[in-house]
Image: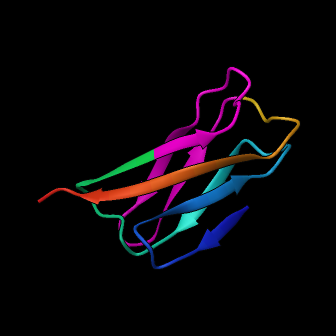
Amino acid sequence: ASIATNATAGKAVLPAGLPEFTINTPHVDANSLVYVTPIGDPQNQVLYVKAKAVGAWFKVAINQALPVDLEFNWWIIKLE
């Protein structure tokens, strides 16, 4: 699952049954900090940034897929 955006912050949904989600955005660079915060109960799972590709995307993940959708906020901060 994935979305494409030109934003540096937003909301997304990790669909039930999937352990990761990709956000395609050109704002990711080598010095970017990417913050993710779940909205609602992540059922003892930690939502984290699994990987990022400069100028292309970042992936958020949990270790075990949930039986329900998990909405989350994300924010990219560029360090100078």
Queried whether the magenta region covers residue 55, the answer comes back as yes
In this rendering, the answer to whether 14 lies above or below 10 is: above
> Residue 31 placed where, x, y %?
22, 55
Queried whether the magenta region covers residue 7, the answer comes back as no
> Residue 55 placed where, x, y %?
37, 72
Query: Which residue is found at the position 64% from the left and 70% from the top?
Result: 3
Left or right, 11 with reference to 36: right
Rendering quarter of residue 11: bottom right
**For the N terminus, which image quadrant?**
bottom right
Rendering quarter of residue 28: bottom left
Query: Which residue is found at the position 59% from the left and 28% from the top?
Result: 46
In this rendering, the answer to whether 13 lies above or below 41 is: below
Query: Which residue is found at the position 53% from the left and 76% from the top?
Result: 5
Q: Give, as a single range, the part of the protein colored magenta.
A: 36-63
68, 24: nearer the viewer: 68
58, 38: nearer the viewer: 38
In this rendering, the answer to whether 55 lies above or below 43 is: below
Rendering quarter of residue 13: bottom right
